[in-house]
Each structure stands twice: as structure tokens, then as C-alpha cells.
Image (spheres, coloured by chain):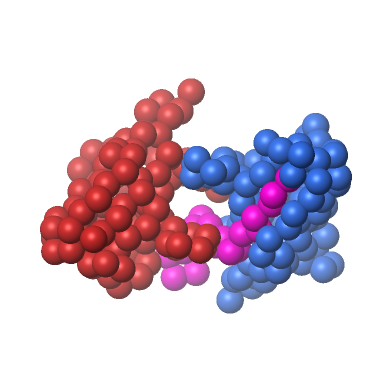
Chain colours: A red, B blue
Amino acid sequence: SQTIHQWPATLVQPVGSPLSLECTVEGTSNPNLYWYRQAAGRGLQLLFYSVGIGQISSEVPQNLSASRPQDRQFILSSKKLLLSDSGFYLCAWGSQEGYEQYFGPGTRLTVT
Amino acid sequence: AQKVTQAQTEISVVEKEDVTLDCVYETRDTTYYLFWYKQPPSGELVFLIRRNSFDEQNEISGRYSWNFQKSTSSFNFTITASQVVDSAVYFCALSEAHDYGGSQGNLIFGKGTKLSVKP
């Protein structure tokens, strides 16, 4: 069966510091991968998606970037965090054939 | 443009009551997919169901049922005999089958409905 991992689970970082969140998927190959952010309130905002290694699409201009160095690894980064980057970050995967997405446990980021 | 509206921001019920969560969608596509996700307090989104636009049969899974009506662009979710463990935020989502500007397969989420089930 497929599983998706995210780490760290929680993170407190000062403004201006770098960020690296990691997401890995097991039990499937060539998945579509997604990064979402959920700010206070409940809406989910799609940040990035990737259909293959090295292929990243950005949905919104922002202080963040994403990379996919391996087939089942998706990384969310920032060189300098802003207060507005605080939120709950969710990684998800979907198969190339299907449309539903399966989410990881999330990382709660607080920028102070 | 595609859009999902969950007009109910919060619902509170007493255990064993039935509750219906509303979802209305907009899409330009004739082939699309609708979803419901559950987000318990732990935060992880749990996939509940996918419905294809060409299949209007209602579905029942235990205490959960879904009513899909293309005529009203609605995909409502009913929990029968609610339980405290049903307390969560529920999201409705839409995905289009065709590629509009590279968005094929991307989920468009509603803002969610927070359900509180009290004992």
C-alpha cells in the first residue's frame, strides 16, 4: 500500500531564516505531487505541483520554491521566511491515471 | 471558471442526529470529478469519496451517503446518526478532466464546513 511521509511535524522558525520541508511517498511510482498551505481559517491553497522529476509548476507567486530531486521526493523551500509563511503545509500525491489525491500528515510552521 | 462553494461554515449537532453538508460547484467542463475529504483535529486530510460527472448514482457507505445532482450542480454529503468521532472539517473539491492552462487534475477545494458533534 502507498504511504506518504512529511517532516518535520512542527517547526518554529524566526523571520529571515531558511526553510526546508520534505515529503516522500512509498508504494507507488511516478506520482503527481502537490504542496498545499492551509492558513488560519481553513482554506487550502495549492502552492506547487509536479508531474515528474524536475518538473515544477507554481500556482501562486510567493516566497517559496519547490523541487523534486527524485521520483517520490518533493521538497518545499524558502531562503528567507516571512511572518506570512506561517501555516499548515500539506503534501499530497495522486496517480497519473486517477484524480483523487492522498495527503500526508502535514507540517505546522510558525514563523516568529 | 471552476469554483466550489460550501455555504455552511460551521454546523453543530447532537450525537445521533442526521446532518447534511452542502456543496455547490461551478465548472466549464462536461467531464469532471467531485470529492469529499475529512480533516479531523489531527490535521491530515482523509479522502472519503470520488464521484464522476457521468455517474449520478447516489452512494452509501455505512452512515455516510452522497447525493449528486448535476441539474443543481450539487454534491451533498449526509451523515446519518452522527457520532462524536465525526467532528471534523469537511471539504468538497472539484477536478476537471481537461487541461485548461495546465490545471488538469488539480483539485479546487471549497472553504470547508466545520462539523461539531456533541455528546
Q: x%, y% of residue A36?
A: 41, 55
Depth check: give the residue in front, B85 or A37: B85
Q: x%, y% of residue A60?
A: 35, 70
Q: Residue at x 28, y 39 (%)?
A: A8
Q: x%, y% of residue B78?
A: 80, 48
Say which quarter of the image contains residue A57. Answer: bottom left
Taking the view exactly as shown, the residue that stands out farthest to the top is: A1
As drawn, A29 above or below B91: above
Can residue B113 be found in the magenta stretch? Answer: yes
Q: Residue at x 75, y 54 (%)?
A: B12
**Can residue A1 be seen?**
yes
Q: Residue at x 83, y 60 (%)?
A: B69
Q: What range of the chain is rendered magenta? A: B96-117
Q: Residue at x 86, y 45 (%)?
A: B17
As drawn, B1 above or below B14: below
Along the horizontal axis of the image, is A73 left or right of A47? left
